[in-house]
Amino acid sequence: MTHWRWGQSEAGIIQMAYIVEDLRASMSVFSRDLGIGPWFVIEHFPFRRLSYRGVETSCDLSLCLGVSGGMMYELIEQHDGNASVYTETRDARGWGFHHYAVAARPDGYDALLQGHLDRGAALALDAEVGVGGRAAYVDTGASLFGMIELIEMTPDVENLFDMIHQAAKDWDGSDPVRVLG
């Protein structure tokens, strides 16, 4: 069951993301107060390649993904002190909202990214992720109060997101935290 409009270069906002100080505690609060769940946790998220503001780097973070009302939510906890899009935001305004994510077809990803750059957004993060596919964050903080993440919807990424959406659809509140990989 695919949720993305593949006939277009993007599917609109598919995810809202937040940086948090404590991933486990935040999952509990977001589930209790917003009904998000179950959460799928990826500890020490694997990057194949990562650059921050044009400089190759590394970043040790864990994240979780959950759904409520058809919207996917991501919580991110960075474990190290390396400079990143997450520490940049935390240092500027504290914990909380970080970015919107949009899905891009593989054949539309480069054009979508270039469109944001042409409109003046700076490339803040450029990565290839462990599950396969590319991700980029463009800095739209001045106009949208957060960044935009472009997610290349490869078949593996699409399958992961579809599994999370399906789990939320049938979720009865049991088994609220599920660790992946």
Image (spheres, rainbow, N blue to C red):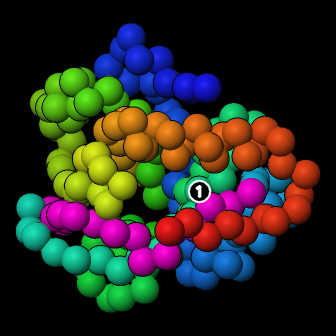
Q: Report the predominant secondary structure element of the magenta stretch.
A: strand
Find disc 1 in the rendering and name its residue: 65
Q: Is residue 115 left or right of residue 99?
A: left
84 up-or-down from 102: above or below: below
**Can you give x and y, in whole percent of width and height, for residue 131 in the image?**
36, 55
Residue found at the very far top of the displayed protein: 7
To which quarter of the image does residue 39 belong? bottom right
Residue found at the very far left of the displayed protein: 55
Q: Is residue 141 left or right of residue 170?
A: left
**Can you give x and y, in whole percent of width and height, for residue 110 in the image?**
16, 32
Q: Is residue 75 magenta?
A: no
**Number of numbered discs on residues:** 1
To which quarter of the image does residue 113 belong? top left
Residue drawn at the location 82% of the way across and 65% of the way down:
175
Residue drawn at the location 61% of the way across and 26% of the way down:
1
Residue drawn at the location 62% of the way across and 43% of the way down:
163
- Mark 1 residue element: strand
Label 1: how many residues lie within 10 Å, few (<14), some (14-19) or many (20+)? Answer: many
Amino acid identity at mark 1 = Leu
Q: Can residue 179 be seen?
A: yes
Which region of the structure is painted magenta?
A: 38-53
**Can you give x and y, in whole percent of width and height, for residue 72 in the image?**
61, 45
Q: Can residue 115 be seen?
A: no
**Can you give x and y, in whole percent of width and height, for residue 82 in the image?**
27, 84
146 up-or-down from 155: above or below: below
